[in-house]
Image (tube, rainbow, N blue to C red):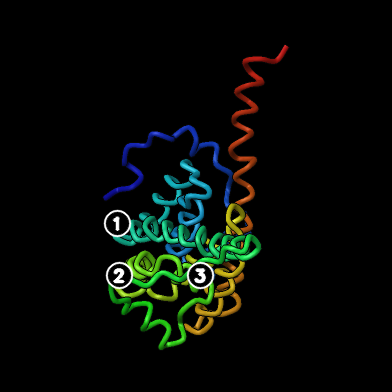
């Protein structure tokens, strides 16, 4: 497929895109252009951001760098995993408030067996932030983890890449989930990631802030042209 000849609904927007900075080029050199494009896609496709112009741009860049449709789709699906953070943050707070109100929550027994949770506990890979979720909704957590773990097991992307993508998603300017950032940095290092690779991921995340200007300047120009005195 010739990406450059594909229909381009956003040709005008692409023409206005800023040139890559030296820092961005350095991150691409350290991580490789395909992984760098997938990381940027992960940031823009996250439910906490949903930056359509960037999603299109980085899908195109990933395909041009050799990514397959399955790899790109895996990144998009991986962006749904942060949904568990709502419960990881909210459940402990709910339990504390129930304790203050002297109506403590009672753990709910699972309706079915929970082999995924049990295995993660046995292997000391069960996140302590999930304890409150397990007590309230063990079957939901079991199903969620069974689905989420497939990203690490299906072989579409290397496990190290999955961890680096999770670092980007959790440390994103629109998310900033520090427990997950720490957890995935630890996992990435255990899989052989270098300090330079993780710094390159964080550098890509830091450049996410530029999208504020990229988006707003076009709106400013449009409004200025129509409404200036």
- Residue at which label 2 appears: 111
Q: Nearer the viewer, residue 19 or 112?
A: 112
Q: From the viewer's perspective, is 57 left or right of 198?
A: left
Residue located 47% across and 65% down the image: 165
Residue 134 screen position, x and y as percent: 44, 71
Q: Is disc 3 surrounded by few (<14), some (14 to 19) or many (20+) residues within 10 Å?
A: many
Residue located 40% across and 61% down the image: 78
Whichever of callouts 2 and 3 sits on the residue coming sooner in the sequence is: 2
- Residue at which label 3 appears: 132
- Residue at which label 1 appears: 69
Q: Nearer the viewer, residue 194 or 1?
A: 194
Quadrant hosting residue 62? bottom left
Closer to the camera: disc 1 or disc 3? 3
- Residue 13, numbered label: none
Report, in whole angstroms, how far the alpha carbon at label 1 lies from the one at label 2: 37 Å
Residue 37 screen position, x and y as percent: 46, 58
Is the residue 1 above or below the residue 226 in the image?
A: below
Q: Do callouts 1 and 2 mark residues in contact (Cβ within 8 Å)? A: no
Q: Nearer the viewer, residue 106 or 8?
A: 106
On-image quarter of the C terminus = top right
At mark 3, the secondary structure is helix
Residue located 59% across and 31% down the image: 218
Residue 103 screen position, x and y as percent: 57, 63
Whichever of callouts 1 and 2 sits on the residue coming sooner in the sequence is: 1
At mark 2, the secondary structure is loop
Closer to the camera: disc 2 or disc 3? 2
């Amino acid at each position: 497929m010739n990406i450059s000849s594909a229909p381009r609904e956003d040709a005008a927007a692409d023409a206005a895109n800023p040139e890559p900075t030296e820092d961005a080029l350095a991150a691409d050199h350290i991580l490789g252009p395909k992984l760098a494009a997938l990381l940027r896609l992960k940031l823009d496709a996250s439910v906490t951001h949903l930056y359509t112009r960037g999603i299109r741009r980085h899908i195109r860049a990933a395909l041009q760098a050799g990514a397959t449709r399955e790899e790109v789709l895996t990144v998009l699906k991986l962006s749904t995993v942060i949904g568990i953070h709502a419960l990881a943050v909210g459940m402990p707070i709910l339990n504390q408030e129930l304790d203050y109100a002297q109506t403590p929550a009672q753990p709910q027994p699972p309706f079915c067996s929970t082999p995924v949770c049990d295995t993660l506990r046995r292997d000391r890979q069960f996140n302590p932030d999930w304890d409150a979720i397990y007590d309230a909704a063990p079957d939901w957590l079991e199903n969620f983890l069974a689905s989420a773990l497939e990203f690490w097991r299906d072989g579409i992307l290397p496990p190290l890449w999955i961890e680096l993508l999770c670092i980007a998603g959790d440390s994103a300017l629109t998310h900033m989930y520090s427990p997950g950032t720490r957890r995935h940095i630890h996992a990435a290092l255990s899989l052989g990631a270098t300090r330079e690779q993780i710094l390159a991921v964080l550098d890509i995340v830091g450049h996410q802030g530029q999208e504020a200007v990229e988006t707003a300047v076009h709106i400013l120009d449009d409004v200025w042209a129509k409404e200036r005195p």
